[in-house]
Amino acid sequence: MKSTWDSEIRAMVRKELQCEFRNRSGLYSGLLLSLTTVFVMSFAFYGRTLTGEGAAGMLWAALLFAGVGSLNRAFVAEDENGTGDLLRLWARPYSVYWGKMIFAFLVMTVTAFLVTLLFVVTSSLDVKSPLLLVTSLVGGCGCLAEIVTLSSAIVSRGNSRSALAGVVALPQLIPLVALGAGATRAAFGVGDLGNGFFTCVGIWAYTLLVVSLGPHVFAAIWKDS
Amino acid sequence: MIACSGLGKRYGDRWLFRNVEFQVTTGECLVVVGRNGSGKSTLLKILAGLLPPTEGSRRVVGDPRTSLGYAALDQPVYPVLTVLEHLQLAADLRGVECDNKQLLEEVELGYAASTAGGNLSSGMRARLKLAMAIQCPVSVLLLDEPTAGLDATGQTMFKRVVDSRRATTALILATNDRRERSLATHEINLGL
């Protein structure tokens, strides 16, 4: 059998799913943190009308919590457990990167949709453009997954990994949050919808940029570590 | 074939070893000996590509993923993946097809195929790591204290597995065990 990229990446994603669903602590803690954020905000604004601006900011804060909570899951835990060496022995760097990235994207997307659904229901927000909201969230989750995967790989062999991962991820997250909040605000009916879609294109462009650079940076890190 | 030239590893100000040079070809067995902390495991990790050397270089003929097998005493396995899932993952990532069940029979671990890595004893883990190392027809086998944790039947199994691959494999062992040292065609002593 000749090794193919898709079979290697599928094997990595399957391994990530098996490990995550059998050892649920990481998945649950990320989801719990995001849902708690939504509930806290709902209680804080109980009886008041939440503005579109406030809602967009809060929604992205909840998504960031889920993303930063995943930092440990990608590579830090793998290197702390010593199992990263098994992947170094068997796999090509790009397979490892894409496998981890796709898994992070799946987890992040499911979390984002659960959080958004709960957020919209509990805050009685009127979504003016579901299409804009969904495309912004999917693009944002792709970007978030890439940033989390790469940041986790960069710090996985250093000391004080968790704190360092946040510092490494922050500069990459700022443009995403700014664009994401802008597009989501428009989806909630604040400002011009056309500008919202234009901002959404910005999210996808930024996502494409980080996703196209990420694998090459990762390959260099993986080889040198 | 595996070769290294001018290999050295330093941690802080302390050199573990310097100027290590050798070439091991098919049918040969190099045994690396030395006191605890002399760098035997580190040397094997560098040869496997898991650690960068401070100086020097190593060369393996072929794609290291399929031409190099590595098993070490301190190598953890995934606690939630079963024995068979480990072998399937390794095969998929390496892009090789093999009869994993037969492989498990060869290392006498067939009865634990569906046992999770976290529930394996140290001897069972050693057998699993050996199975992962010999999964494809590797040309270089790097084994770090391979029989530590194995009982008498395990040691017999190890000898049988190694003997059946001697003709087609370059073998490097890091050990101080007298029985394993008897396999050597060459020996390097890292610790004085």
Image (cartoon, coloured by chain):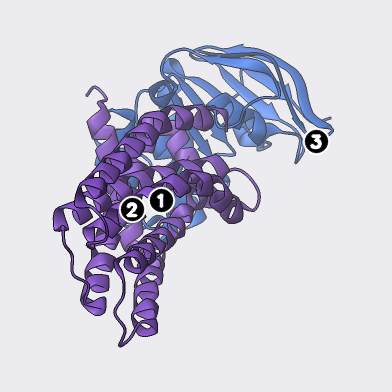
Chain colours: A purple, B blue
Q: Residues within 10 Å of mark 1 (few under 14, many from 20)?
A: some
Residue that label 3 marks:
B12
Kindly report the distance in space between the C-alpha atoms of the residues bearing marks 1 and 3.
43 Å
Q: Amino acid at mark 2?
A: Gly
For this orientation, the residue located farthest to the front is A192
**Where residue A122 is drawn, which disc sits there?**
none
Position in image of residue B22 (x %, y %): 65, 13
Q: Position of residue B66 (x, y in %)?
A: 38, 24
Seen at 32% across and 43% down, the residue is A203
Tell me where residue B90 sits by quadrant: top left
Q: Amino acid at mark 1?
A: Ala
Can residue B52 be seen in the rendering of this structure? yes
Q: Quadrant of residue B165?
A: top left
> Amino acid under label 3?
Gly
**Chain letter belonging to callout 1:** A
Q: Quadrant of residue A89?
A: top left
Crowd band around label 2 with a 10 angstrom C-alpha radius: few (<14), some (14–19), many (20+): many
Q: Which mark is residue A178?
A: 1
Q: Position of residue A28 (x, y in %)?
A: 36, 68
- Same-chain status of marks 1 and 2: yes
Disc 1 + disc 3, Cβ < 8 Å: no
Percent position of residue A197, x then y: 22, 46
Tell which residue pokes out farthest to the bottom in this image. Answer: A47
Identify the subunit bearing mark 2: A
Cα separation between marks 1 and 2? 6 Å
Considering the numbered disc 3 on the image, is that residue within a helix, a strand or a loop?
loop
Which quadrant of the rendered structure holds the N terminus of chain A? Answer: top left
Q: Is residue A207 above or below residue B2?
A: below
Residue shown at the point (28%, 36%) measured from the top left:
A9
Same subunit, labels 3 and 2: the answer reads no
**Nearest to the observer: residue A199 or residue B155:** A199
The tag on residue A182 is 2
